[in-house]
């Protein structure tokens, strides 16, 4: 009974202290290591059930990205945490301003790749990318290039050097989330392989490997084979010398997004 | 000026009255849609048969009504020439059935409320000359049916402790029954009934018992105080037995059971309570001591039928936990269960329906792979039961997750979860509309969907099943075979239940998609 009474008093006290309006920002403090730990703790209990333990996403979008749609800067992220995002499942949170800044600091670490200095020459790597590698046939940088492969405009901000190396040598070990190779067979016997852009119960849209957009109703197809883990990208093992590979990795690492 | 003239003209023409007796006979007046699931038995089935499996290809959009939000879960009511919908966050709008034009709107300001799953609302209830709305800030509001003006407005619970209401209330006889949401924030759940005329609370059934009440022994220590067991989906009602059937949600914290040892009654249960008094008649707990957030907040479907050669009063239940159940609805006796979707949390069920737990599915520091994930194999969206085909139509979600144990400190108004979730690498979640033999649970057919669905299902005497998907398709299937018959790309994800009604001699089908309500009829 005493425990109960104490609890009621505590509840009443904390209720009275709650803001009814969203928390207003204070000037952003410099995040200390202790703030990152505290932010990580809050993230783990309050955010990770939707956004994933390491920001991989789930019910909510992935946060392990260098740029976040609703939080291009830290103040925007503060407001998103405090107020939520209208017309979405992201609720507002009754955290103190200090707690919100701690979460902001922690979330920014999720999208950050540990910085390593590449050994190669990015300028030479850029030439290899365009010429010997033939990469622009499938990949886009800053809006130019093919669209079959992932956009590489900010790949250096998103991926480690080790990942980039692996992607060049063993592309099928590094197929990114959301990339799915499909093989379609039409009722008149045509066989088309491409990357899935969109699919629903009645239709599928792909970009075929000649970079052409194609759309099919499912009744136009006799087979639709999904090939998870497959990639049209060739392995560059043997195509480049070890030094050239490092140059190319250095070039990719230098791609940090549009200014 | 034009709008206000319209308002005056339309308001004057309205004389809507929905006495209890009219809702009791809902199945025999299919031109209307009088209560959330179409009838108190929650069949979401209509005897209308103008739209059939042979002419459904001629279905065309009759009108659309646009809202300012893009996730709309409303299930409309229709009667006497008007459709009543809720709009996010907490508005109610009456629409003219002929034109889709608004007659009146009730706009409610909503404070900052902690919500697990968006600013959603699933519809209103009607009784006599009033409509009833549950609000995100945990109020119950009675509106004048003719004008949308407030008759009364009562606080059901304190929203500052993360109580909220998203369901459509259920109006029966002289009361309005309303459930509560907020188990992700450690509320203590309940089911309430209010006097429809005055808004005075008639009874409350605590879904987590307090000291001295039966069931308290299933909660260790003080854990009952934050025990969850919310009641956030509309239940069903047997007027003869005068019993309400309501599903309850997960215990709190969702994924961490060590602080709440015991079965945690009455979480993850189907409860049968006396509609006059709120006294518990029986309960059946689908998941004792849930640590996977598999709420039993689905729709209890009431059917009278011969079962194993004996006439019985049944309740059918497609559960978020991946099993389809049949219980005796007068006694709660477990009669049958059959798995309808992938699940790994249980190794099976014993002869009384109690699950045999799979210890590998308990969230752990190393991560536990669990099917279904915490959005469930089913969820709040409605199934449909067709007496014509004897099939129970259930949208199934095929998706797992990896659950990592975290701390779950309780602070009122803050998340109280106990685990974080990661997607299963390489998994491509999908879904299916499945037709189950209502009396054996055997799958008769399925229609595959590209992603796990959030749409309910309507079946009709025209031999057609309607549903939708997250990719925006509203579609019709042959109720007997599952063959696709018709589709319409609405352009917005569907998170809603379809309904059907008649207006001026034509059968319509309506659904919310994206930020719109669409009504379809034959050309």
Image (cartoon, grey):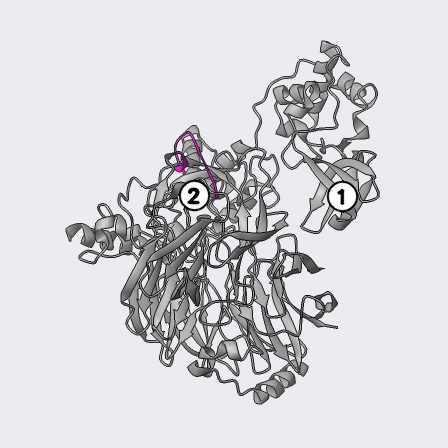
In the rendered structure, which segment of residues is drawn in magenta?
A: B360-373
Residue B41 location, x and y as percent? 45, 69
Chain letter of mark 1 equals A
Q: In this view, does A28 lie to the left or right of A117?
A: left
Q: In this view, does B11 lie to the left or right of A186?
A: left
Q: Does the magenta stretch include residue B363?
A: yes
User: First in sequence: mark 2 or mark 1?
Assistant: 2
- Vertical position of residue B381 compared to residue B63: above or below: above
Point out the frontmost of discs 2 and 1.
1
Identify the residue under disc 1: A222
Residue at x 36% of width, y 40% of height? B357
Residue A122 location, x and y as percent? 73, 19
Q: Is residue A233 magenta?
A: no
Question: Do pointers 2 and 1 mark residues of a single chain?
Answer: yes
Residue A143 visible at all:
no
Residue at x 72% of width, y 40% of height? A224
């Amino acid at each position: 009974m005493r425990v109960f009474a104490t609890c009621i008093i505590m509840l009443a006290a904390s209720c009275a202290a709650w803001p009814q309006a969203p928390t207003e920002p204070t000037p952003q403090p410099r995040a200390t290591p202790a703030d990152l730990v505290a932010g990580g703790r809050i993230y783990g209990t309050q955010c990770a059930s939707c956004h994933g333990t390491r920001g991989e996403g789930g019910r909510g979008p992935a946060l392990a990205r260098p740029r976040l749609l609703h939080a291009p800067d830290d103040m925007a992220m503060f407001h998103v945490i405090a107020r939520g995002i209208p017309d979405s499942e992201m609720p507002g949170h009754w955290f103190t301003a200090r707690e919100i800044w701690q979460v902001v600091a922690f979330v920014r670490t999720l999208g950050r790749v540990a910085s390593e200095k590449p050994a190669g020459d990015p300028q030479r790597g850029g030439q290899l990318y365009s010429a010997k590698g033939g990469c622009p046939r499938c990949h886009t940088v800053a809006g130019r290039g093919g669209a079959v492969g992932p956009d590489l405009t900010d790949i250096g901000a998103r991926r480690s050097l080790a990942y980039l190396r692996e992607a060049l040598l063993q592309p099928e070990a590094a197929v990114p989330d959301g990339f799915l190779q499909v093989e379609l067979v039409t009722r008149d016997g045509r066989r088309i392989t491409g990357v899935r852009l969109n699919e629903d119960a009645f239709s599928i849209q792909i970009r075929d490997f000649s970079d052409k957009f194609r759309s099919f109703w499912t009744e136009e197809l006799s087979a639709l084979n999904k090939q998870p883990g497959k990639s049209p990208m060739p392995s560059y093992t043997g195509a480049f010398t070890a030094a050239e590979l490092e140059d190319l990795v250095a070039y990719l690492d230098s791609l940090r997004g549009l200014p | 000026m034009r709008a206000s003239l319209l308002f005056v003209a339309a308001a004057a023409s309205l004389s809507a009255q929905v006495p209890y007796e009219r809702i009791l006979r809902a199945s025999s007046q299919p031109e209307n849609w009088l209560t959330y699931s179409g009838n108190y038995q929650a069949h979401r089935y209509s005897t209308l048969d103008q739209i059939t499996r042979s002419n459904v290809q001629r279905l065309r959009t009759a009108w659309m009504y646009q809202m300012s939000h893009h996730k709309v879960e409303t299930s409309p009511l229709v009667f006497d020439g008007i459709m009543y919908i809720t709009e996010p966050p907490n508005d109610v709008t009456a629409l003219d059935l002929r034109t889709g034009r608004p007659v009146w709107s009730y706009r409610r300001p909503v404070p900052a409320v902690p919500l697990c799953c968006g600013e959603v609302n699933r519809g209103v209830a009607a009784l006599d000359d009033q409509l009833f709305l549950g609000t995100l800030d945990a109020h119950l509001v009675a509106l004048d049916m003719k004008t949308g003006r407030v008759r009364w407005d009562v606080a059901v619970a304190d929203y500052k402790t993360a109580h909220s209401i998203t369901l459509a209330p259920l109006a029966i006889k002289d009361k309005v029954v309303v459930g509560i949401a907020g188990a992700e924030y450690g509320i203590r759940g309940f089911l309430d009934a209010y006097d429809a005329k005055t808004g005075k609370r008639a009874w409350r059934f605590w879904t987590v018992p307090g000291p001295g009440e039966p069931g308290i022994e299933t909660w260790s220590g003080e854990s009952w105080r934050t025990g969850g067991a919310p009641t956030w989906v509309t239940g069903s009602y047997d007027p003869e037995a005068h019993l309400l059937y309501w599903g309850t949600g997960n215990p709190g914290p969702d994924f961490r059971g060590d602080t709440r040892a015991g079965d945690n009654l009455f979480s993850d249960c189907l409860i049968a309570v006396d509609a006059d008094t709120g006294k518990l008649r029986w309960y059946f707990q689908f998941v004792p001591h849930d640590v996977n957030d598999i709420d039993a907040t689905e729709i209890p479907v009431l059917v009278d039928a011969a079962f194993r050669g004996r006439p019985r009063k049944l309740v059918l239940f497609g559960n978020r936990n991946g099993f389809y159940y049949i219980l005796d609805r007068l006694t709660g006796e477990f009669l049958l269960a059959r798995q309808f979707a992938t699940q790994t949390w249980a190794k099976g069920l014993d002869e009384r329906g109690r699950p045999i737990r799979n210890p590998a599915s308990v969230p752990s520091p190393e991560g536990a792979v669990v099917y279904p994930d915490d959005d469930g194999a089913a969820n709040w969206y409605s199934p449909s039961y067709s007496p014509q085909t004897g099939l129970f139509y259930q949208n199934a979600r095929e998706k797992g997750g990896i659950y990592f144990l975290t701390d779950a400190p309780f602070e009122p108004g803050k998340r109280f979860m106990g685990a974080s979730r990661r997607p299963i690498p390489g998994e491509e979640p999908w879904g299916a509309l499945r037709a189950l033999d209502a009396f054996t649970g055997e799958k008769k057919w399925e229609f595959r969907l590209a992603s796990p669905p959030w749409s309910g299902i309507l079946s009709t005497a025209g031999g057609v099943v309607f549903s939708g998907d997250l990719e925006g398709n509203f579609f019709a299937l042959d109720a007997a075979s599952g063959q696709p018959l018709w589709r319409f790309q609405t352009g917005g994800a569907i998170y809603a239940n379809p309904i059907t009604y008649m207006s001026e001699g034509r059968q319509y089908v309506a659904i919310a998609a994206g930020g719109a309500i669409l009504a379809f009829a034959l050309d």
